[in-house]
Image (cartoon, rainbow, N blue to C red):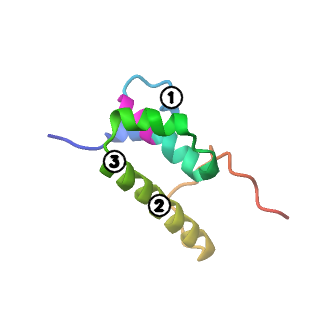
């Protein structure tokens, strides 16, 4: 059994909301990860309720910790000016002050 995203689906992860190839769980995880990265304090009770319908408490913990790790390591790589394979241009994160 194959797990994870295919290369083709990975190329369209930015379209997760409208792409029927993503499962409900994948769409929720992508929405959560985006919200976690952009405005973690804005994660609402409504989102937790939707997440709890499709994920166990252990899965929610794992997803949250994974988002935190990935966000943190990405920022550490930026601080250290470590080369990246690609730029993420879709982020709505505010630009740093000049």
Measure the alpha-carbon separation of dots 3 and 1.
24 Å
- Left or right of 28 on screen, residue 89: right
Q: The C terminus lies in which quarter of the figure?
A: bottom right
Measure the alpha-carbon separation of dots 1 and 2.
21 Å
Q: Is residue 3 visible?
A: yes
Q: Position of residue 36 (x, y in %)?
A: 55, 50
Residue 17 is marked as 1
- Left or right of 17 on screen, residue 65: left
Residue at image coords 53%, 66%: 72
Q: Position of residue 46 (x, y in %)?
A: 53, 34
Q: Is residue 14 visible?
A: no
The magenta span reads 22-29
Q: Quadrant of residue 6?
A: top left
Q: Which residue is mark 2?
A: 70
Measure the alpha-carbon separation of dots 2 and 3.
20 Å
Mark 2: secondary structure:
helix
- Sequence order check: which comes first, mark 2 or mark 3? 3
Q: Quadrant of residue 19?
A: top left
Q: Which residue is mark 3?
A: 57
In reply to whether residue 19 is colored magenta, the answer given is no
In reply to whether residue 23 is colored magenta, the answer given is yes
Mark 1: secondary structure:
loop
- Quick one: label 2, few (<14), some, or many (20+) residues within 10 Å? few
Mark 3: secondary structure:
helix
Residue at image coords 40%, 22%: 20
């Amino acid at each position: 059994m194959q797990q994870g995203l295919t290369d083709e689906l990975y190329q369209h992860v930015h379209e997760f909301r409208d792409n029927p190839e993503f499962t409900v769980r994948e769409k929720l995880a992508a929405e959560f990860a985006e919200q976690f990265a952009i405005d973690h304090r804005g994660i609402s009770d409504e989102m937790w309720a939707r997440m709890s319908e499709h994920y166990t408490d252990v899965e929610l913990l794992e997803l949250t910790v994974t988002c935190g790790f990935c966000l943190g390591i990405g920022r550490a790589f930026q601080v250290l000016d470590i080369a990246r394979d690609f730029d993420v241009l879709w982020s709505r994160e505010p630009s740093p002050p000049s």
